[in-house]
Image (cartoon, rainbow, N blue to C red):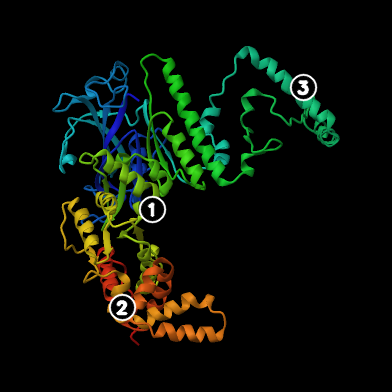
Amino acid sequence: MSILIDRVRISNFRSLRHVEVVLSPVTVLVGMNNSGKTSFLKALHLALGADRRVVNADDFFIGQGTDTADEPENTITIDLRIIPLDKDGKRTNEFDDSWINSELGGNLINFDQDDQQYVAVRTRVAFDHLRNDYQIQRFVLNDWSEGDDWLNTSEKKRLPLRFEQIVAFLMDAQRDVVGDLRNRTSYVGRLLTKVEIPPEAVAEIEERLSALNADIVGHSELLSHLRTILCELNRTVPSYGQGVEITPVSKKLRDITKGLDVQFRDSETSSFPLDCHGMGTRSWAALLTYQAYVSWLDKQAGKDIGKPYHPILALEEPEAHLHPNAQRCVYQQIQNSIGQKIISTHSPYIAAQAKLGDIRHFHKVGTDAAITSLNLSGLEAEDIRKIEREVMNTRGELLFARAIVLFEGETDEQALPIFARAHWNEEPFMRGVVFVGVGGRGNYLPFLRVASAMGIPWFIFSDGEGGTIDKVTTALDGLGLAMPHGRVVVLPKGMNIEQYLVDKGYQPELKQAVISFQGPGFANEKHKRAKIKEINGWMDDALLGYLNSWKTKISPHWASIIAKLPDERRLPEAIKKLFMAIDLVINPVCEVKDEG
């Protein structure tokens, strides 16, 4: 790859009111549904797609001050910056000769303040009242302005609507190779239109096809019978030949690809057409046909000296219908395909394989989309390894959360979701809240770095023990923050969660949890009565000793019992404080209660 689209700016397209995204050779877009990922891919296709692009009123951002897409001030703007790369994929000062002699050459090339070459291209879409339709125009920009005033950058030359050698290909999540085989505008369909056979071989092959048809019909009593009956057409329709032929196989090479099918052998003894396979295989095969298409075009372009080729794949959900290991495999195949790739995904398995610097997180701020990424410039190699090992490889789902709750141990991981269900009257994941155990009190920082960089609200629920508080303080210091902090809820007086519950008077519920936990081990009713009497007679020290001995196994028991209490006590004060803080950030829809 000798060029790269490294910066994209979009204004007024769908949910993308005013955004800028830095791209790499492989860029992975993550975030919740309806956060703008698909809109970004479609914007790239609108600017660089080779096929026909249709714009309608729904493609315009409608915000305050504009009510309809055909108002004069409502214009879609998509700016792209194209830079040259060296053989190692690093930015270099000049485009190579092949690109200078191509459609990027001439007066399209600009120089930045470091005397490095680039090309800046603008696509503009607005309503044309004379034509009563939307008009797409493309221009080369005078420069690449920094700052929020980039929309006012002047344009120096109008360009054709399409580049021939820099092309974006959009593949949505509904791809299916079975439909593509019958669609002449699909990637495999376009390839099939390019099938060429040397003229000297055509006559020989078609003669063999005619013989094959005659052989099939001759060996089939039914087909022969059908041909005999259809020959009655000769009585009413003038015919100067045989009149009727039955051709199980196309006899003309120009028609041979119309009925083309693909068989996939998944065992030693059997093969089936792809329409007999599941959607995972069919979706995967559709991706492979794209690779076949662009690699063929690249090969053909290479035959013409001085004609480079830069395809851009805008791919939605490569994981569609695939199991985790297949998702990892298909991502590796995509990485190895030619050209630039921009991939949107909801798969933590794919996100975990991406380089940290290649991930862009999409989220909503009000009605607008915002895009963030992880700045690695100030991190040591060990810091980066910790993020990859402790966050991305094990808890990649946090990239798709509306809020993250961090804690150090398994007890909180068992209990907090139970209390969350009691607070919200639904599963916490329905609110987009993810509970993440960091695996020890010294492991907060990698998770905080990812959450902060990606713009995902984070919260910490921490024991009040001195050593634990020190670790939380150190982690916040790594982000330039200090304790106390509004998103950190700390239990008081050096307590862990069990001590805190005892201090708040939950002994009856905790003892009930112990009885429930021990219940399967009671030998008989007499033994049960004796154990219940013993447990109810425990002092606080004995109760705490037992709870701490069975922390992770018994915590779901006491959390479920407390969460079912009929009054304010069903949420201990510190836990309620945590959920109230989350409510203020994620701003859930208020529930209206019937007062009547």
- Residue 140, position as x, y percentages in the image: 23, 30
Image disc number at residue 502: 2
Image disc number at residue 133: none
* Number of dots carrying numbers: 3
Say few, some or many: other residues with alpha carbon within 10 Å of mark 2 (under 14 / 14 to 19 / 20 or more): some
Looking at the image, which residue is at 35% across and 58% down? 436
Q: Is residue 558 left or right of residue 504?
A: right
The relative height of residue 175 versus residue 395 in the rendered view (above or below) is above
- Residue 180, position as x, y percentages in the image: 54, 38
Circle 3: element type: helix
Q: CA distance from mark 2 to mark 3?
A: 91 Å
Q: Are marks 2 and 3 in contact (CB under 8 Å)?
A: no
Q: Is residue 406 left or right of residue 244?
A: left
Quadrant assignment, res 413? bottom left
Query: In the rendered image, which residue does mark 3 sit on?
Result: 211
Q: Amino acid at mark 3?
A: Ala
Q: Nearer the viewer, residue 285 or 408?
A: 408
Q: Amino acid at mark 1?
A: Glu
Q: Nearer the viewer, mark 1 or mark 3?
A: 1
Circle 2: element type: helix
Query: In the rendered image, which residue does mark 1 sit on?
Result: 397
Q: Nearer the viewer, residue 504 or 577?
A: 504
Going from N to C along the chain, the mark reached first, 1 or 3, is 3
Quadrant assignment, res 275? top right
- Residue 117, position as x, y percentages in the image: 21, 24
Say few, some or many: other residues with alpha carbon within 10 Å of mark 3 (under 14 / 14 to 19 / 20 or more): few
Q: Nearer the viewer, residue 39 or 46?
A: 39
Q: CA distance from mark 1 to mark 3?
A: 60 Å
Going from N to C along the chain, the mark reached first, 2 or 3, is 3
